[in-house]
Amino acid sequence: MTETVFITGATSGFGEACAQRFAKEGWKLVLAARRTERLLALQKQLGGKSSVCVTTLDVRDPDAVRTALEGLPDAFQSIDVLVNNAGLALGMGPAHQAATEDWDTMVDTNIKGVLHCTHAILPRMVERNKGHIVNIGSVAGDYAYPGGNVYGSTKAFVKQFSRNLRADLIGTALRVTNIEPGLAETEFNLVRFKGDKEKATQLYKGTDSLTAEDIAETVYWAVSRPPHVNINRIEVMPVCQSWAMFAIDRK
């Protein structure tokens, strides 16, 4: 039986690369994102309506998430893997200069979006005693850095939520994995700097960063382990990145 993966934030970056990777292995895809035109183009590219179902969705809206899941065609109703990928960072200034609306957007997307999608799909998985929740976290959830205030905090939530899901699901066959990427060159920083390409590309200058395909391969590897194996978390950085030194303000 062909398995089905539900991927949020599927029209760019890690989400799109995951769609490509799972499609390569013959999975049925449910792709969710806010940009309808990109979704339709991806659907056509990856096999058409018979193997790819698309839904225009803002994960911040719990009613929209429930409606989207309820409206899936019968052939796509049984979700085997949920990839909670939709997320973003906004701004990189210190907390006292940050816009509260940016904080709200990050919390609503990175935390509540993960909650809404998980809550809508998890009961179905428990009922079937089969499923895998893959959350896309970040090394920012482990290591603080200047300007990462709320973004890093949301990813720390994702890490702990993943752990608590595992605790709640003891005794079932369900699996939960938190993938924590480091520096990766995608549209991420273009969004973070609200379209400022110069700022976005500056962060990657002189680096050999991770690619979206690197993370998609990591996700697929975790999912394709034998059913009795759960990969709790994977922290992955490019070789050019490591842990920062403690910041010291010298007078």
Image (spheres, rainbow, N blue to C red):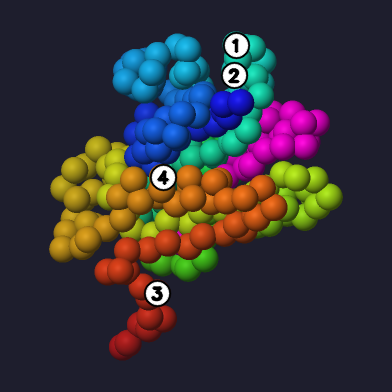
Q: Mark 3 highlights which residue? A: 243
- Along the line of sight, which residue is nearer the eye, 213 or 136? 213
Which mark, by number, is residue 73? 1
Q: Is residue 18 above or below residue 232?
A: above
Check whether the beta carbons of the residues at disc 1 and disc 2 lie within 8 A of each other: yes
Tag 1, which secondary structure? loop
Q: Give the answer, above or below, for where 242 lies relative to 178.
A: below
Question: Which amino acid type is shown beneath numbered disc 2?
Answer: Phe
Give the residues drawn in magenta, as a range.
Answer: 114-139
Residue at position x 65%, y 19% from top? 77
Image check: 124 left or right of 219?
right
Residue 195 is situated, as x and y percent measured from the top left of the image, at 25, 38
The kind of residue on which mark 3 rests is Trp
Dot 2 or dot 3, earlier in sequence: 2
Task: Give neighbour class at mark 2: few <14, some 14-19, many 20+ (Cα, 10 Å).
Answer: many
Q: What residue is shown at x 21% (from left), y 42% (from top)?
A: 196
Q: Which residue is mark 4?
A: 216
| Residue at horizontal 34 percent and vertical 45 percent from the top | 213
Q: Are marks 2 and 3 in contact (CB under 8 Å)?
A: no
